[in-house]
Image (cartoon, rainbow, N blue to C red):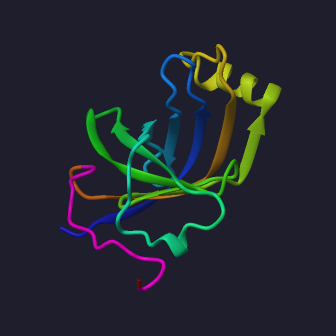
Amino acid sequence: MADQVRTGLAQICSLSGSEKEGKRWLHGHIIDLFTKKCIGLMGTELIDYIDTTIHQCCIGDEPPIYYNITLIDYESQEELTEVATRTNGDYFKLSSPHFRFVTEILKADHQAESHIQKFFPLASLSGRDALVSIGQCTFSTTKPLFELQKHKESHCCDH
């Protein structure tokens, strides 16, 4: 069965790591614009991850940050976990084989704190820098949701 590519509106809260744990993490919601279903997104930074599919010439000035992300269908409790690459600093892009997101609106400081308190009430802001990124995303699914299929990796250059 072929993948179904869906479009959604995502809001992703990114928090710096606490002094205790050190890792950055993501928490977000995606609204599927076709089904109106809410899909959860969680991610934890992979500190020592090395991506062997990207050549050094493709990285640029700011190295990517890698996350182990999980997309969750709250209705069926199905999950998809995979590695995602975050690039472009605060106005970030997040991409994995099944998920693509680009920041269109960035909230920081007081705006981010207010947004997080309203939409992510369980997120602890104690001693953390927080940003909220809002934008369009695409994600691929099959029936049942998030059934894995093999995807060919794309490369930015031929090295």
Magenta highlight range: 145-158
View extreme (right): residue? 110
Q: Percent position (x, y) of residue 30?
A: 50, 43
In the rendered image, which quarter contains the C terminus?
bottom left
Q: Percent position (x, y) of residue 34?
A: 46, 55
Q: Nearer the viewer, residue 144 or 29?
A: 29
Residue pictured at 60% horizontal, 30% vertical: 15
Q: Is residue 31 above or below residue 156?
A: above
> In the image, is 142 to the left or to the right of 94?
left
Residue 50 is a magenta residue: no
View extreme (bottom): residue? 158
Residue pictured at 53% horizontal, 75% vertical: 57
Q: Percent position (x, y) of residue 134?
A: 66, 46
Residue 147 is a magenta residue: yes
Q: Is residue 99 above or below residue 69?
A: below
- Main structural element of the magenta stretch: helix, strand or loop? loop
Q: Nearer the viewer, residue 113 or 64?
A: 64
Residue pictured at 65% horizontal, 58% vertical: 88
Q: Is residue 82 above or below residue 156?
A: above
Q: Nearer the viewer, residue 61 or 12?
A: 61
Q: Percent position (x, y) of residue 50?
A: 38, 55
In the rendered image, which quarter contains the N terminus?
bottom left
Total tally of numbered discs in the picture: 0
The answer to which image quadrant residue 80 occupies is: top left
View extreme (left): residue? 1
The answer to which image quadrant residue 14 occupies is: top right
The answer to which image quadrant residue 70 occupies is: top left
Residue pictured at 52% horizontal, 26% vertical: 22
